[in-house]
Image: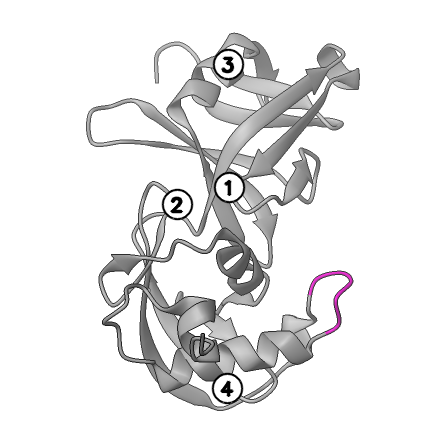
């Protein structure tokens, strides 16, 4: 039996999908990168090559040409070459090219959480949907926003200005850890972890 074309095996969305040259180049570039550690995307300065039809949905699912990318290994690989640009764009970058993608909310999703200890000595670690392991500390902070219904949306800083939306289930667990502290004369609700107090919102009347 003849083998399927390499591009289709690696990244096609369906049997009928036509190969995308840009995606093929990115896949080839990934294959040439060192296998250990994250690629040094901050050091790369390739020309901007426009956009590629890749979208990261709010639930963390990656899409190409409107169809979900079902190869989890490929998604994890692409996630290692994400970069946040100064103009707010999220791009996939290699030493040779830079391609903008669409991100509906955050590029990552925090899907698991482990908590050890209490108070100042508490340690909180997260796993993302692409298997990044992130420990909450000064360089990997939490920020909180409100959703349209008025609920909390926590985000975890993963790397390079890229954030992970914390799932709703984990949000409830985080809120259970909240405590009130006075900061600069104002009471705040927040979470102590990693030697930091991660503010959620002012406590009491504005």
> Which residue lies at the image location 57% right of the left edge and 11% below the top edge?
177
Eyeballing the image, is 54 above or below 165? below
Disc 2 designates what residue?
Answer: 60
> Which residue lies at the image location 49% right of the left edge and 57% below the top edge?
75
Horizontal arrangement in the rendering, residue 58 relative to residue 4 (left or right): left
**Front tag of 3 and 4:** 4
Comes first in the chain, label 4 or label 2: 2
Comes first in the chain, label 1 or label 4: 4
Eyeballing the image, is 73 above or below 114? below
Disc 1 designates what residue?
Answer: 129
Would you say the residues marked 1 and 2 are in contact, meaning their CB atoms lie under 8 Å apart? yes
Comes first in the chain, label 3 or label 2: 2
Would you say the residues marked 3 and 4 are in contact, meaning their CB atoms lie under 8 Å apart? no
Question: Crowdedness of circle 1 by 10 Å Cα count: few (<14), some, many (20+)?
Answer: many
Expressed as whole percent of the image width and height from the top left, the position of residue 102 reads 32, 63
Disc 3 designates what residue?
Answer: 173
Residue 97, label in figure: 4
How did the renderer colour the structure? one colour
């Amino acid at each position: 039996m003849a083998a399927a074309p390499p591009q289709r095996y690696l990244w096609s969305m369906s049997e009928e999908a036509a190969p995308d040259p840009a995606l093929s180049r990115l896949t080839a570039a990934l294959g040439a990168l060192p296998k250990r550690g994250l690629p040094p995307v901050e050091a790369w300065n390739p020309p901007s090559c426009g956009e590629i039809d890749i979208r990261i949905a709010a639930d963390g699912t990656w899409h190409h040409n409107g169809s979900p990318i079902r190869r989890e290994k490929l998604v994890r690989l692409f996630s290692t070459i994400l970069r946040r640009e100064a103009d707010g764009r999220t791009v996939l970058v290699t030493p040779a090219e830079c391609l903008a993608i669409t991100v509906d909310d955050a590029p990552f999703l925090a899907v698991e959480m482990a908590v050890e200890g209490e108070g100042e000595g508490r340690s909180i670690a997260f796993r993302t949907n692409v298997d990044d392991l992130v420990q909450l500390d000064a360089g990997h902070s939490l920020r909180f926003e409100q959703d349209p219904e008025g609920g909390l949306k926590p985000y975890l800083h993963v790397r390079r200005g890229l954030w992970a939306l914390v799932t709703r289930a984990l949000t409830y667990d985080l809120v259970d850890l909240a405590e009130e502290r006075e900061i600069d004369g104002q009471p705040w609700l927040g979470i102590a972890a990693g030697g930091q107090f991660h503010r959620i919102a002012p406590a009491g009347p504005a």
